[in-house]
Image (cartoon, rainbow, N blue to C red):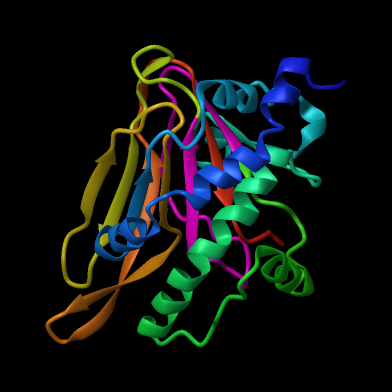
């Protein structure tokens, strides 16, 4: 089954998307990631692009697997992992965002004393994943209905892990759904967890730490663990695109 013509056209805007990403204020994004462990990219995708991506969900041939969260204790709702080849827009997000994030990831690893550095281009990093047996693509579409939610978690799929990932809200709060806020928690040593709720709008993206980030304290740098999830939907339906840069075992 082929995608509808309008969907195919909307997903074909990789060049304009690359221009949008290049034009972002990366100095501000870097500062926000260092300070908070996350950075908001407002209006990264247009409403038409969001709708086109959400419309992929019923197209089973585009996905390698489907997960019903309640069966695994992950929450309620479901998600599907894309198969290769990825839709053009999703592949473009991976390859265009990664070169801006790799220097941040390298600096974080250096601060944390982690002896792993990331290459400048995403294709090189994916080759490293595949050499380690991590062959399965990880970008995913998530779908939530009334009373669905996603428990706090981390997206770790193997030894090769890129420490930043991106979530993009494809639905419009207040129109398509209510509730369903994106939630981050940060656990610092010997302190209680700090929660943060991000009020995303349709087309907004958030870059955030997958697992850990460095924080400068009075006695040097220490590690902070982060988890993310989605609060309970009170009405409607919510779709999200997850862009993870490492592949899975």
Which quadrant holds residue 162? Answer: bottom right
Disc tally is 0
- Compare residues 69 and 109 and report the one nearer the observer: 109
The percent coordinates of residue 147 (x first, y second) are: 40, 21
The percent coordinates of residue 37 (x first, y second) are: 32, 59
Q: Quadrant of the C terminus?
A: bottom right
In this rendering, the answer to whether 229 lies above or below 60 is: below
Magenta includes 185?
no
In this rendering, position of residue 17 left or right of residue 176? right
Query: Which residue is found at the position 46% from the left and 84% from the top?
Result: 114
* Res 57 visible: no
Boundaries of the magenta span: 141-169
In this rendering, position of residue 148 left or right of residue 194? right
Q: Quadrant of the N terminus?
A: top right
In this rendering, position of residue 70 left or right of residue 172? right
Query: Which residue is found at the position 21% from the left and 77% from the top?
Result: 216
The percent coordinates of residue 46 (x first, y second) are: 51, 27
Which quadrant holds residue 205? Answer: top left
In this rendering, the answer to whether 217 lies above or below 30 is: below
In this rendering, the answer to whether 199 lies above or below 133 is: above
Furthest-right residue in this view: 1
Query: Which residue is found at the position 77% from the left and 61% from the top?
Result: 135
In this rendering, position of residue 187 left or right of residue 126? left
């Amino acid at each position: 089954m082929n995608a509808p013509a309008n969907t195919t056209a909307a997903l074909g805007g990789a060049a304009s998307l690359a221009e949008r990403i290049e034009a972002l204020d990366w100095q501000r994004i870097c500062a926000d990631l260092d300070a908070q462990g996350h950075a908001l990219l407002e209006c990264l995708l247009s409403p038409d692009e969001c709708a086109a991506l959400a419309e992929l969900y019923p197209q089973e041939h585009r996905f390698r697997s489907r997960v019903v969260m309640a069966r695994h204790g992950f929450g309620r709702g479901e998600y599907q992992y894309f198969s290769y080849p990825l839709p053009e827009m999703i592949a473009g997000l991976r390859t265009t965002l990664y070169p801006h994030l790799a220097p941040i990831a390298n600096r974080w690893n250096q601060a944390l004393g982690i002896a792993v550095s990331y290459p400048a281009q995403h294709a090189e990093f994916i080759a490293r994943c595949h050499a380690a047996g991590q062959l399965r693509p990880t970008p995913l579409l998530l779908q939530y209905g009334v009373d669905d939610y996603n428990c706090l978690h981390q997206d770790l799929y193997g030894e090769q892990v890129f420490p930043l990932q991106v979530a993009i809200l494809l639905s419009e709060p207040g129109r398509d759904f209510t509730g369903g806020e994106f939630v981050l928690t940060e656990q610092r040593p010997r302190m209680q967890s700090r929660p943060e709720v991000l009020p995303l709008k349709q087309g907004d993206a958030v870059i955030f730490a997958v697992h850990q980030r460095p924080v400068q304290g009075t006695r040097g740098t220490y590690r902070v663990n982060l988890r993310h999830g989605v609060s309970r939907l009170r009405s409607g339906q919510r779709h999200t695109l997850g862009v993870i840069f490492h592949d899975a075992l």
